[in-house]
Amino acid sequence: MEEGGVAPGNSLAAACGAWIVFEHEAGFSMTLPRARTWGRREQIPLIRVRGRCRRRTSVAALCCYKSGEKSRLIHRPRTHLQLQGARKSFSWKDHRDLLVRAHIQLDGPIVVVWDNLNTHLAAGLKRYEAEHDWLTTVRLPPYAPDLNPVEAIWSLVRRAMANTAFATPDDRDRKLRHELRRTQLRPHLIDGCLTATNLAINPPPPP
């Protein structure tokens, strides 16, 4: 990965007319982040929240870019029960199904850029990629969240949900879906998330 262009997906995407798709997963519990807010002088604002909740929601999201097309955000939620031995994140099959959904919605080949999460490296997912020529994956360098625009999507969503006390997990999930949908309808926000990485889908012209 390099500033000014996505490599090696740059030349590959140009050659096959593919979408460049960044992927990342995040989890949301009932305890949401705090943010600065207004309050009476010398009185700290307090928000009462529910106690421990065993239901956690994970969301995998894709920021999708292609020259000449509006940027897209595709996402899929997954609810987990925080029980001993229960899975607390997406499986490789969940990631595969999301990529299939993106391929259908985008109606073209995709070059997926993501990190080295163990589920991304699963043998089943590698085998699926080898069997389908519409799918190519590119690995981000280790510890490089600043190169993934989906990280900025999470920042936008968490900022909008901060300082909120939800009565139930369903209330939280409704707000989460609302904020993701709000971002989907504003391609300029998705473009801005890419700009924040200092990457560009189109390489600069040669001097």
Image (tube, rainbow, N blue to C red):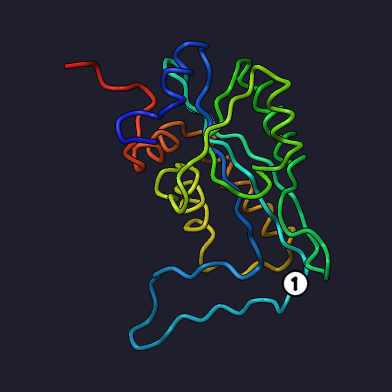
Q: In this view, does 74 lie to the left or right of 10?
A: right
Which quadrant holds the C terminus? top left
Q: Residue at x 21, y 16 (%)?
A: 206
Residue placed at 26% from the left, 21% from the top?
204
Q: In this view, does 13 lie above or below 94?
A: above
Q: Position of residue 159 (x, y in %)?
A: 47, 58
171 vs 96, nearest the viewer: 96
Classify residue 108 as left or right of residue 147: right
Q: Residue 205's x, y, as percent?
A: 24, 16
Left or right of 81? Residue 193 is left
Residue at the spot 51% in from the left edge and 81% down from the top edge: 46
Question: Mark 1 = which residue?
Answer: 53
Count of numbered circles on the image: 1
Q: Position of residue 192 (x, y in %)?
A: 37, 38
Residue 191: x and y in percent read 40, 33
Tell me the element at label 1: loop
Residue closest to the eye, 71 or 137: 137
Q: In this view, does 150 lie above or below 13?
A: below
Say which of 127 and 151 sits in front. 127
Residue type, mark 1 in image:
Cys
